[in-house]
Amino acid sequence: MRASPTETELPEAVWRPLAARHRERVAAWTEPRLRRRSRGERHPVEDFLWEYYSYSPKALSSWHPGWGVTLTGDVAEFAGVRGFVVDGDRAWVDPELPGRRADQVRWIRELLAATDSRPARLGCFGLHEWAMVYRSRPDQVRHTQLPLRLGSAGTDAVVENHRIACSHYDAYRFFTPDAVERNTLRPTLADRTRNEQPGCLHAQMDVYKWAHKLAPFTPAELVADCFALAAEIRELDMRASPYDLTAWGCSPVAIETASGKAEYIAAQRGFGERASGLRQRLIQVCDGVLAEPE
């Protein structure tokens, strides 16, 4: 049996309550999603977190201790968990997994560190969402169930009266053809490490993407912390969008006004500080996984 790379041991009396608290915490996010899905209902704000990030409610609910931790006691439930080794009354993340995933972990670390090293560029005002509907037909709008708060002509006017400087490829690639030419940047997937910056709401949300892609090296609690931030940011993202979400309990952040711009930047700055702390925790996870065994 392969040896455990143990830095910490958690007896069952410690880890089982941690696992229970984690499942209770994430149930506030997973259960509404599962109820809606069972009824065939859509949510214009929350569905994004499940569909774009492709991490299931079951996966988010699953507790794992992270790299360098050995669990002791009745660990039979981990016998079928991908990436784990179980030996009698002990379980840990497979010590051969870092070798198989080293390239992925290094790339994620590089992106996280590069993003965090740059000054935050604030003041994009969430115009990526406006650029996704610029000069589009009603049937081309991404959220067809939502009305445009300013109508089509008013939405187009906001885009035309602002400078757009979107640095995030996964937002930019959904711009309408007419909006593409208005962006001052041309982000691509290949140059993501050179472009992403910590003021971007999507880069802030993406700490959740990198947290769950690093699982099971990432402690489940850290994945949940990243989800919690992403959920708050997603709400701001849609409140600042051209859509009218008042029927969904979301008041608009009117970025076409001075007060709306100030509100957006203040929230953007606060989220950036939280995202930076989470990136540093994820970088520590990467460093632990990539460290040469003694």
Image (cartoon, grey):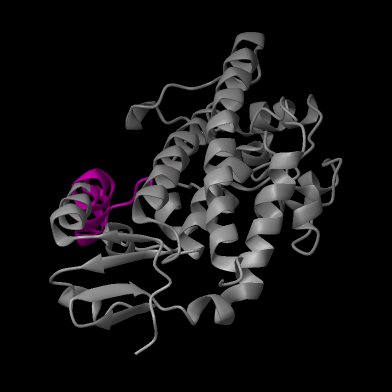
Please name whichever residue, 69 or 197, is drawn nearer the observer in this view of the structure.
69
Q: In this view, does 244 lie to the left or right of 124?
A: left
In percent of width and height, residue 142 lies at 54, 50
| Residue farthest to the bottom, as pictured | 1
| Residue farthest to the front, as pictured | 294
- Tag count: 0
Determine whether 138 is above or below 229 in the image: below
Residue, x 65% and y 57% (percent of image)?
Answer: 109
Q: Quadrant of residue 63?
A: bottom left
- Please state, as top left, top right, bottom left or bottom right, where the N terminus lies in the image: bottom left
Residue, x 41% and y 78% (percent of image)?
Answer: 94
Please, what is the dominant secondary structure of the magenta stretch? helix
Q: Quadrant of residue 270?
A: top right
Q: In which quarter of the image is residue 116?
A: top right
- Please state, as top left, top right, bottom left or bottom right, where the C terminus lies in the image: bottom right
Determine whether 137 is above or below 250 in the image: below
| Residue farthest to the top, as pictured | 259
In percent of width and height, residue 114 lies at 74, 48
Q: Is residue 29 left or right of residue 268?
A: left
Determine whether 163 is above or below 216 in the image: above
In percent of width and height, residue 119 lies at 77, 32
Does the magenta-highlighted stretch encompass residue 274? no
Q: Is residue 203 left or right of residue 161?
A: left
Please name whichever residue, 53 or 16, is drawn nearer the observer in this view of the structure.
16
- Residue 211 in view (yes/no): yes
- Residue 135 in view (yes/no): no
In percent of width and height, residue 136 lies at 66, 47
Residue, x 65% and y 45% (percent of image)?
Answer: 132
Does the magenta-highlighted stretch encompass residue 28? yes
Residue bounds of the magenta highlight = 22-47
